[in-house]
Amino acid sequence: MGEIQYVPLSVTVGYFALVTIIGIYYTRKATSALDEYYVAGRTVGPIINAIAVVMAIGSAASFMGFLGMGYKLGFLLTLCISASAITGYVWTQFMYSGPLRRHGKFTLVDFLSERYPTPYIRPISALLISIFFFAYLIPQYKGGGVVADSLLGLDFTTGVILTAIIVLVYTSLGGMWAVTWNAVIQGIVALSVLLGLSVTAFYLLGGWNGALIAATQNKPLLMAINPKIPWLLYVGVYTAIFIFMGTAPHVVMRALTSKTARTARLTMAIVSVLAILLYFVSYVGIILGGAAFFPKLKDPDFIVVEQVKAFWHPIGAGLTVAAIMAAIMSTTDAMLLAIAAHIQHDLIELIKPDISERTKVIIAASVIIVASILAILLTLFAFRAELIGVMVTLLTGAIGSSFFWPLVLGIWWPRATKWGGLFGVLSGSITYSTLELMKVLPKFAAVFPALIISFLFTVLVSLMTSPPSKAELSLVLRMHKLSDEEYEQLKARYG
Amino acid sequence: MEDASTEEIIRELKEYISLRNPAIWNSLIIVILSVVAFTLLWKDVKIFGVSVALWGLFAISIIAMIQSWIFIVLMDRFELDVEKKLRGER
């Protein structure tokens, strides 16, 4: 623990006060109707929604972990991440956003359980997502602790607990409305800080050529393929993040907040542009700057922090803390809301369906509090030494392996049956987890066999079982057929 | 009656999904080009001494992003045309 840094601390406290006020302001609205609690009343526009999607996805990994991976293992690995994020969003735009918006349910589990109506798909999917998202909280809290320790002079434990408490307060009070508006503020702050740092590095190094020469003098392999990295690792990182971008349940929830299928597509197109700014424009300058100015960092995750300390005023340091904490917080509260939704909506209501609206909100808030406390304990006592980027990439692979094919085939292949969908989810998640635990493949590469097996199980089990019922087929049709309102809007627009 | 209704839904679904092939193909092209890029990486193909696979992958993602903007308008018109055609047939 170093000396407390009062200027950055004041800026950070001011920021936290702002987001807490926003959370409290929307409390009354959130507790009045569960629909508003989870999907913001479907009144947000595409630009706001796009920033919220980026911030829900962007986390301690996007703002620390992936940059550290690029600094240590080479810029081309982060180029993989950039490409996969952008193409993942484009894939989502074409393949999911319209049909899922027309489907009109709350969560990915709602979709799966209606499309594949076995008694098992809802609890199994809800449990898997809750476990994966709960695990996702740990690297986020670790990131909060590390930043507070490094830039504010607080100790790691205090930083972790403080991060969790602030997220907990506004998430449990405000619901998605507060999260949406907080995500917009957070998105603007976070993007500005990272882009600003990238510009600073290029300015100080005399532009692209100067930065490239200075960085590669210190780290000759920075811009080349790293011979120590198996090619399957590059492919694994690309694939895990690509399938996660489209399958991530909190992205699905955000797609559902769009007014129409058209605005859902527009949202994802804006997201792909923001992804270029975040994952390429800001990354390239920060990684080159890090290699040029700080070639011997002990912990690569601090590439951002070290440059801020060296080149920016303490107010800039405070904004950086706010930005990174913002990214951590927006992801964490989206995850907490999803965990609460699944446990309350998909597990508890399955056992006891006749609970009141008020009880539902109380259960959701209680789940959020308990999950936060458990995640704090695990961060402090079990996973403190794990790398943020590695933990997050492993979890993106787990989520994508489990749900990618059941989601894609559920929308686009009417012959997919309920048993096919169930076995697709089970086989993908079991294969991925087993191979990663056994460590028989390069890190992240388990996503390939998991995807192949999930695809085969979904297709083969579907073909071996009775065709989908009329209700299941009607659901698929509803996702592809324009509603009368949508049809009239398009006719009025294009004639 | 039950079978006839189900048949009608299946027929309508086939029409919708087959008419939306451009959206599916557009997405599949992204995947196919990504596979090509990683094959170049696997084979360590270099042009003028530079490994181009991952920069090529990034270029593909930029093209995909530009395409996605073009398709916002095209998909609207496309969906409207499909809907007009299918509603007209019923």
Image (spheres, grey):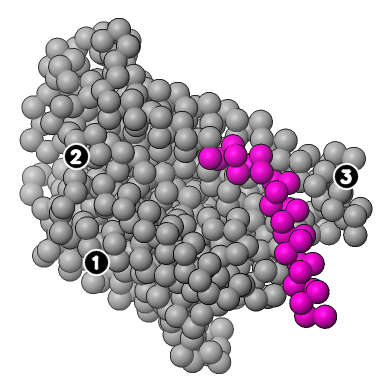
Which mark identifies residue A492? 3
The disc, 3 or 2, on the residue closer to the chain's N-terminal end is 2
Q: Which residue is mark 1?
A: A375
Question: Is residue A13 among what the camera can see?
Answer: no
Instruction: Name the mark nearer the viewer: 3 or 1.
Output: 3
The percent coordinates of residue A258 (x first, y second) are: 63, 53
Rendering quarter of residue B70:
top right
Give the amino acid type for the residue marked by disc 1 in the picture. Answer: Ala
Query: What stretch of residues is rendered in magenta?
Result: B1-28
Same chain for mark 3 and mark 2? The answer is: yes
Chain letter of the residue beneath label 2 in the structure image: A
Which mark identifies residue A301? 2
Same chain for mark 2 and mark 1? The answer is: yes
Residue at the image position 21 percent from the left and 56 percent from the top: A436
Contact, mark 3 vs mark 2 (Cβ under 8 Å) = no
The percent coordinates of residue A296 (x first, y second) are: 8, 27
The disc, 2 or 1, on the residue closer to the chain's N-terminal end is 2
A181 relative position to A317: left or right: right
Residue at the image position 30 percent from the left and 72 percent from the top: A371
The percent coordinates of residue A51 (x first, y second) are: 51, 44
Q: Secondary structure at mark 1?
A: helix
